[in-house]
Image (cartoon, rainbow, N blue to C red):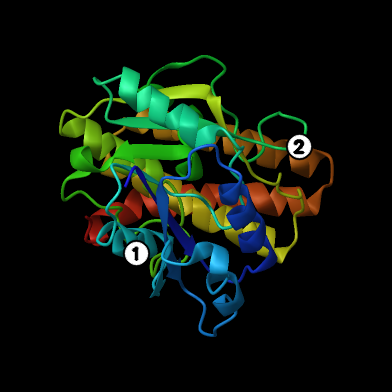
Amino acid sequence: MLFSLIISTKGRVSEMERLFMSLLEQTVQDFEIILADQNEDDRLAGVVSDSRWKDRVTHLKSSGGVSRGRNEGLDRATGEIVGFPDDDCCYPPQLLEQVAHFFETQPDYGFLSGRSVADDGEDSVSRHAALASPIRRTSIHAQCIEFAFFIRRSQLGELRFDENMGTGARTPWHSDEGPDLMLRLQDQGVQGYYDPAYAVWHPRPVRSYDAKAIERSYRYACGGGYFLRKHRYPFWYFSYLLARALAGFGLACLRLNGGKARFFWARIRGNWRGWWGYTSTATA
């Protein structure tokens, strides 16, 4: 088996159907799907029972967040290369062929990261680096998005995602599980490469400042602060990020934009909690 594609999912059906259709259109069909289903009901039964997926889907019931689901999938994976598509993304038709070619021609690299794009071809979820280069600590947040991350399974070994991190974790640290795994891989001598040419479609989030968005900002910022402290980034760098958020908060206040001000204040509180909360939490 060439690819194992591990999907940790909760709450989505039509998006999953769209993702599965994009996999049917791949020019390379040598892959298995491992579905870590975190729904309490059987809403995905119709998707996985489709005859087109006979013997290609391993359907696991899971709980405890996206990182735990991916880890449970990794324990079942048999492919040479592992990817982690989001349950609301889509793979362009030639993506797996392009990724396979990269690993065939670049034996010195153990993992590859691409970028997320929207319908207009521009960045959708994160601001990505414009140029291809080896992955570095100083630029990892511009080079990493989990659903465009592929790794040689042989290079992963016993390493797994930190289950304290990522969406749905039983801690407040709801982000940066991908950069965390990449840096731990590099600590073991496994080198990674970023190339924006390897693009995965993902819907662009609707910018709003309602209660849900503010809570998400807080938990993602908690994960960001936790990640920085875990990997011993200097306090001056953490302070620089706080200062940027404070500038956004101040500008929103001057413009009397209460929702945006609360959004940035949530980010500030989250970064602070994550930075100081790292030592109190057991890590992978």
Q: Amino acid at mark 1?
A: Arg
- Residue 137 in view of the camera: no
Please provide percent x and percent y for residue 121. 72, 29
Instruction: State the residue at coordinates (25%, 21%).
Output: 107
Residue 68: mark: 1
Toward the viewer: 151 or 217?
Answer: 151
- Residue at the far bottom: name it: 41
The picture quadrant where one finds residue 32 is bottom left
Please provide percent x and percent y for residue 73. 33, 61
Instruction: State the residue at coordinates (67%, 38%).
Output: 124
- Residue 189 in view of the camera: yes
Element type where label 1 sits in the image: helix
Quick check: 55 above or below 122? below
Please provide percent x and percent y for residue 74. 29, 56
Toward the viewer: 74 or 226?
Answer: 74
Circle 2: is it few (<14), some (14-19), or many (20+) Cα within 10 Å? few
Describe residue 153's horizontal placement relative to residue 200 as left or right.
left
Element type where label 2 sits in the image: loop
Is label 2 or label 1 in front? 2
Q: Amino acid at mark 2?
A: Asp
The picture quadrant where one finds residue 214 is bottom right
Q: Which residue is mark 2?
A: 119
Q: In this figure, what is the number of numbered marks?
A: 2
Instruction: State the residue at coordinates (31%, 32%).
Output: 233
Quick check: 192 above or below 82? above
Quick check: 103 above or below 118? above
